[in-house]
């Protein structure tokens, strides 16, 4: 007999309804003997079912204790794993320089996000399973509950599919370490420096100081400009009559001196290389210069390198060409009225030509 049925039977047996008197008068008051019989019946029912109660209580207690201990152990294991990931510094591409790219704040936020997700999932699974086991211990039919939960889950998932997409995309972005705090990325819909990485939204700082809130589900491709190294490239356009050996020697001297000065020697992760001729035209030729730099410093290195190349070329007499051709200084300015036509006689209303072209007035009118 189930527990609810037994309780109902006990209450019904321990409180008998008073029987009406044969003459139709008021019911008789229960006597002491009736009370003794009710107490005896209740005591017998308790003695008969106490083992069932004890078994159910012990089973529920065992489920709760096991679930609590298992939850604590799993969460502690996840915390230790995240701490170990946070302490470990992995080099990029197997080089010593790659270890400098690991940002402390980036590792901290990434580890916290991963740990939060894993702990939440573990707690939900363990406590949800324990709750279902407790309900089954009381012989409650779980089929309607599970069916209702399934229908509600499908409805919530369909209604909040964008939220689910953002959440799952954020989880995989963090697990795969696609970008982190301090990285400069191009997310397609916006670009800038990452200042916060969340499970649903990524916060970027734009070039003009604006803050972009990008939903993780809207990011279809990500270009990370801060991982590994960057390349600074400068194209130098000179006249085709210039001596290429002389141009190459000057560029090599500029690059060598550039790599030995502070703070550029820290930004450069390799020597300045002369790649050679990129193109040759009738009026110009292009010499390409490249250098491997620290991530995010390519534009700074390019500007300084152009500055130095221009000053050195001016000192060496090497002319940089390109763009619109310059006008000679000794050529006189063009006459602005040269393209204007001569004045016409028809412009003067008193001229014979204008008078001859005037229409005749209608009859009966005087001119």
Image (cartoon, grey):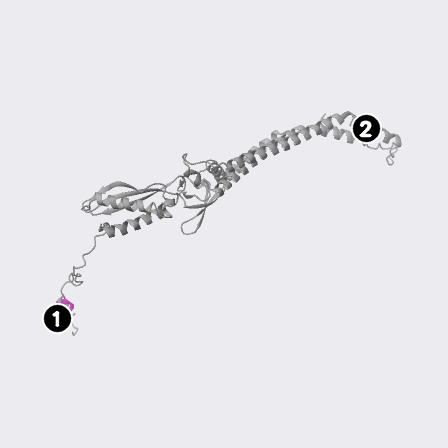
Inspect this view and state whether residue 140 appears: no
Horizontal and vertical percent for residue 226? 41, 42
In this picture, residue 62 sits left or right of residue 24:
left
Question: Nearer the observer, disc 1 or disc 2?
Answer: 2
**Which one is in front, 293 or 16?**
293
Inspect this view and state whether residue 7 appears: yes
The answer to whether 240 is drawn above or below residue 358 in the figure is above
- Identified at 79% across, 26% down, the residue is 47
Crowd rating for badge 2 (residues with CA inside 10 Å; few <14, some 14–19, many 20+): few
Residue for badge 2: 43
In this picture, residue 214 sits left or right of residue 49:
left
**Which one is in front, 162 or 147?**
162
- Identified at 75% across, 25% down, the residue is 51
Is residue 76 on the magenta stretch?
A: no
Horizontal and vertical percent for residue 16? 82, 31
- Identified at 63% across, 32% down, the residue is 69
The answer to whether 290 is drawn above or below residue 344 in the figure is above
Instruction: Look at the numbered disc 2 and give the secondary structure of its residue.
Output: helix
**Which one is in front, 146 or 250?**
250
Residue 351 is labelled as 1
- Identified at 22% across, 43% down, the residue is 245
State the extent of the magenta-drawn residues as a range.
345-353
The residues bearing labels 1 and 2 have C-alpha atoms spaced at a distance of 139 Å
Horizontal and vertical percent for residue 365? 17, 73
């Amino acid at each position: 007999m189930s527990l609810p049925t037994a309780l109902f039977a006990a209450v019904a047996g321990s409180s008998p309804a008073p029987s009406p008197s044969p003459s139709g008068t008021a019911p008789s008051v229960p006597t002491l003997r009736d009370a003794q019989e009710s107490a005896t019946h209740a005591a017998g029912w308790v003695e008969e079912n106490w083992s069932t109660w004890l078994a159910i209580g012990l089973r529920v207690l065992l489920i709760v204790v096991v679930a609590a201990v298992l939850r604590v152990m799993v969460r502690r294991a996840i915390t230790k794993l995240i701490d170990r990931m946070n302490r470990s510094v992995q080099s990029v591409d197997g080089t010593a320089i790659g270890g400098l790219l690991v940002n402390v704040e980036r590792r901290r936020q990434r580890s916290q996000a991963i740990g939060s997700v894993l702990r939440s999932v573990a707690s939900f699974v363990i406590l949800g399973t324990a709750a279902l086991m407790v309900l089954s211990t009381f012989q409650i039919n779980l089929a309607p509950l599970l069916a209702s939960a399934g229908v509600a889950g499908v409805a919530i998932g369909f209604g909040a599919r964008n939220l689910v997409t953002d959440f799952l995309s954020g989880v995989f972005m963090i697990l795969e370490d696609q970008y982190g705090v301090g990285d400069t990325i191009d997310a397609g819909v916006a670009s800038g420096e990452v200042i916060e990485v969340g499970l649903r939204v990524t916060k970027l700082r734009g070039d003009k100081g604006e803050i972009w809130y990008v939903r993780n589900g809207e990011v279809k491709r990500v270009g990370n400009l801060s991982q590994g190294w960057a390349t600074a490239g400068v194209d130098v356009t000179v006249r085709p009559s210039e001596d290429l050996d002389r141009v190459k020697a000057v560029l090599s001297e500029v690059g060598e001196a550039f790599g030995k000065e502070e703070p550029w020697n820290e930004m450069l992760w390799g020597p300045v290389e002369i790649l050679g001729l990129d193109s040759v035209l009738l009026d110009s030729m292009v010499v390409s210069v490249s250098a491997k730099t620290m991530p995010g410093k390519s534009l700074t290195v390019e500007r300084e390198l152009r500055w130095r190349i221009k000053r050195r070329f001016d000192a060496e007499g090497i002319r940089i060409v390109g763009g619109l051709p310059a006008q000679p200084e000794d050529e006189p300015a063009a006459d602005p009225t040269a393209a204007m036509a001569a004045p016409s006689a028809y412009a003067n209303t008193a001229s014979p030509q204008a008078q001859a072209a005037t229409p005749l007035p209608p009859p009966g009118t005087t001119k």
